[in-house]
Amino acid sequence: MSQAPGRPAVDEAMDGSIYHERQRLELCAIHALNNVLQYKHFSQEAAEEICKRLAPDTRWNPHRSVFGTGNYDVNVIMAALQSLDYAAVWWDKRRSLEKLVLSEIHGFILNIPSNISLGILSLPIRRKHWIAVRLVNGLYYNLDSKLKGPAKIGDEIALREFLHKFISEGPCEILLVVRKDVEETGKWMSTS
């Protein structure tokens, strides 16, 4: 697996551990970024700085919650990845998932519908939620911050089934996290 220069080599970790941040406030975008990177790089403060850069002269920043609890949009995720020489590529859900060149994709960030919970009580209200999926130690994992820990997806076939399930069940967006050079050359997608 390729990685950005100077980044921890997770797949070579001695203990085989998987980095997984748990949900706090509305910070799922930050958790998804750190989980896909497999180390803590971004904080709420860093996301707030990105929001200010994206909309410097606005009273109400459109890229986050007005309550200051997070709920960051895709522009914050894309800018955060760009700061590390990665790119987020929108996946066209009309294409076959077989076209993905998984060896060129660092990970995935999905925007999916999710129920709102208050403790053990689940409300009949759904909001969008960011989750990360990443290859670690030869297997793909769902690194959703609402989970107690990483959930094993499995091999490449299982990953494609996992992604297809989300696409077929309703509103879902998939971002491919790739190195900047992979984005520029389009190596993340097979042309055959």
Image (cartoon, rainbow, N blue to C red):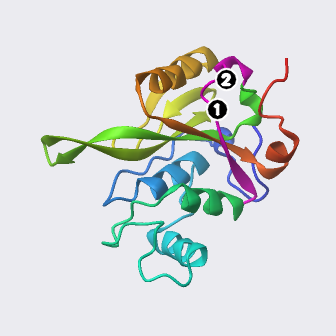
- State the SS at label 1: loop
Mark 1 highlights which residue? 92
Confirm whether residue 148 shows in the render: no
Q: Residues within 10 Å of mark 2 (few under 14, many from 20)?
A: few
Direction from residue 95 to residue 25 in the image, left or right: left
> x, y (%) of residue 22?
36, 50
Q: Which sits in the foreground, 57 or 114?
A: 57
**Quadrant where the image shows the N terminus:** top right
Residue 105 in the image: above or below residue 95: below
Asked if the residue at tag 2 contacts the one at tag 1, i.e. Cβ–Cβ closer than 8 Å, the answer is yes
Residue 115 in the image: above or below residue 5: above
Question: Can you tell which quarter of the image residue 11 is in?
Answer: top right
Q: Which mark is residue 95?
A: 2
| Outermost residue, right side | 185
Residue 52 in the image: above or below residue 16: below
Q: Amino acid at mark 2?
A: Arg
> x, y (%) of residue 119?
14, 48
Direction from residue 108 to residue 148 in the image, left or right: left
Confirm whether residue 139 shows in the render: yes
Residue, x 50% and y 22% (percent of image)?
Answer: 162
| Outermost residue, left side | 121
> x, y (%) of residue 24?
32, 58
**Quadrant where the image shows the C terminus:** top right
- State the SS at label 2: loop
Q: Which residues are magenta?
A: 84-99
Question: Can you tell which quarter of the image residue 160 is in?
Answer: top right
Residue 113 in the image: above or below residue 83: above
Query: Rounded to the nearest whole Å, what is the CA distance between mark 1 and mark 2?
Result: 6 Å
